[in-house]
Amino acid sequence: MPYLRPDEVLSRFATFARRDVRDSLDDEEVAFMRGQVGSMASTLDFLAGELRGMKPALDRQETVLLDALDGVESTLVDGAINDEAVLDAVATARSRITDAPAAETPETLRARETALLDACETVLCAIDDEDLDEADIRSLRRPLYGFLDTRLDAQLHLLGREVTDE
């Protein structure tokens, strides 16, 4: 049996609902049903787009997070902030990212997404748990905000909203 991509299946169902089912409901008495079928088709299109856009969004987020972890490390070294716990958290975060599944099924994409979020949270929690002054905390957290911004932009894009730099 051939592998059917979930995004393609959802798109085909949406097209079928919109073209065949909805268009066959001509009578005014079924106007409500036409609306419901149109709404269902829109939902299926949205889900298909989310599935289609998930891997590229996660690829981008992973790249940005790895760069952010480099930024945290360089802030520790260049800023002369001596904190082994944060360095260990960065190493743990990198490990979580590299251990995340590479396959592209919806389940493994969700696992990869969770790994990225857990990696970021690990470092943020380590920073919060240490006895650092506010300026050091801000400078260590700043690189990770780029990852969070990238993630938010990807989510807004999947929702169909244009991302604008303000």
Image (cartoon, rainbow, N blue to C red):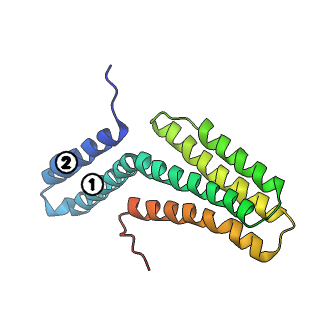
Residue at 13% of width from left, 50% of height from top?
24
Q: Split into 4 quadrants, where in the image is the N terminus?
A: top left
Front position in the image: 75 or 13 = 75
Marks 2 and 1: in contact by CB < 8 Å? yes
* Amino acid type, label 2: Val
| Secondary structure category for the residue under label 1 | helix
User: Callout 2: helix, strand or loop?
Assistant: helix
The location of residue 105, given as percent across then percent down, is 45, 35
Q: Position of residue 113 (x, y in %)?
A: 55, 47
With respect to residue 69, does 111 lie above or below?
above
Q: Is residue 41 above or below residue 103?
A: below
In-image side of 77 versus 47 (left or right) = right
Q: Which one is in front, 16 or 127? A: 127
- The image quarter containing residue 100 is top right
- Residue at mark 1: 37
Percent from the top left, x then y, of residue 146?
55, 65
Count of numbered labels shown in the rendering: 2
Give left or right: position of 22 versus 155. Answer: left
Identified at 43% across, 65% down, the residue is 156
Residue at horizontal 79 percent and vertical 64 percent from the top: 81
Disc 1 residue type (three-letter): Val
Query: Which residue is at a point 48% across and 33% down the rendered structure image?
Result: 103
45 or 78, which is in the foreground?
Answer: 78
N-terminal-most mark, 1 or 2: 2
In the image, which disc is placed on residue 21?
2
The residue sitting at the bottom extreme is 166
